[in-house]
Amino acid sequence: MNVREDVYETTVGLEIHVELATNSKMFCGCEVSFAGEPNSRTCPVCLGMPGTLPVPNATAIDYTMRIGLALNCRIAEYSLFHRKNYFYPDMPKNYQISQYDAPLCERGHLDISGDFGSTRVGITRVHLEEDTGKSVHLGGSGRIADSDHSLEDFNRAGTPLVEIVSEPDIRSAEEARVFVAELRSLLESLGVSDVRMEEGSMRVDANVSVRRRGEKEFGAKVEVKNMNSIRSVGRALEYEERRQREALDAGTALVQETRHFDEKTGTTSSLRTKEFAFDYRYFPEPDLVPLAPSTQWVEQTRAALPELPGGSPGALRHRIRPGRSRHRRAHRV
């Protein structure tokens, strides 16, 4: 089907998860390393055993502030960890320690340019959480839908993970691809992650919607997952943009859902209807006190930033608000 390009407008917002290159996990002393013997890097804390208490990794907090400062974010005076509850098998606690309405970094931006011109992409938030474990689906295609059974490896569970959420300022698959490439280069320069997308240490989800030009309301938001390379980001979003435009041309209603990108076919397929925040029943983590990085800590982190792609740290317009140091003593590893 031929779709007139000038009739529709595409809107993309990105959610990018980055595993931090710390020596130990977010809330315990277990080693962080790729692959290895399944379930060999676990302890009572990351397995969620009764009576255990998490202790935040100070290096992970510092790395998150580095990312926030490099993205021109405000560092929060007061930040909270929350419990994000869900019944997935890849987290032994049955909840994930994350941040919800009080992230560590917020309201930044990253400038990108290309054949499309120049675009300033807003950064909604940069928040810190722990990664999940890994499910291995055996039999069939290797996906859960047609597998015989699944195995769980909790080595990755508890790895420090930063989520970078953009504003819906991206208007094409090419802009999204360039944004991911620029962000990956920035993170590599900061030394906070190895950003190996093929190993899952940098993972990209995209929220894509299409609307007719001139309409004020965004179209149905579709989340696309499983993009494990910069090339995949471009291919997946090109397909999804075309699919939604053709559906609208045919008068087919689009629904808010999550879709899986198939690298072999270059297509997306429906996984599930989209969850909403209330589905996760967020509430403040009772075993962790709020984060309130001191002004001194933030300034030291800013001063230690290396020269970054596009300019030196001094050229960046960092916005830092002072805060009192009220965080629990954290382990720095």
Image (cartoon, rainbow, N blue to C red):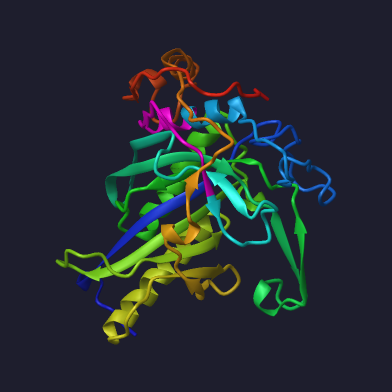
Q: How many marks?
A: 0
Considering only vertical position in the picture, is 5 above or below 162?
A: below
Q: Residue at coordinates 41% horizontally, 28% vertically from top-left? A: 69
Decide which of 296, 56 is in the foreground and name it. 56
Please tell me which residue lies in front, 50 or 99. Answer: 50
Dividing the picture into quadrants, the one containing residue 102 is top left
Relative to 105, residue 82 above or below: below
| Closer to us: 281 or 25 | 281
The quadrant the C terminus occupies is top right
Please state the horizontal and vertical placement of residue 7, each as a whole percent of the image: 20, 73
The x, y position of residue 318, in whole percent, is 34, 24
Q: Residue at left 37%, top 69%? A: 241
Q: Which residues are magenta?
A: 66-83
In the drawing, does residue 72 fall left or right of residue 23? left
- Position in image of residue 36 (x %, y %): 82, 47
Whether residue 239 appears in magenta in the rendering, the answer is no
Task: Please state the horizontal and vertical placement of residue 96, each as a whole percent of the image.
Answer: 59, 49
Query: Image quarter for residue 299?
Result: top left
- Left of 23 or right of it: where is 101? left
Task: Give the answer, above or below, for where 206 lies relative to 6.
Answer: above
Q: Closest to the observer: 55 or 262?
A: 55
Q: Is residue 42 left or right of residue 78?
A: right
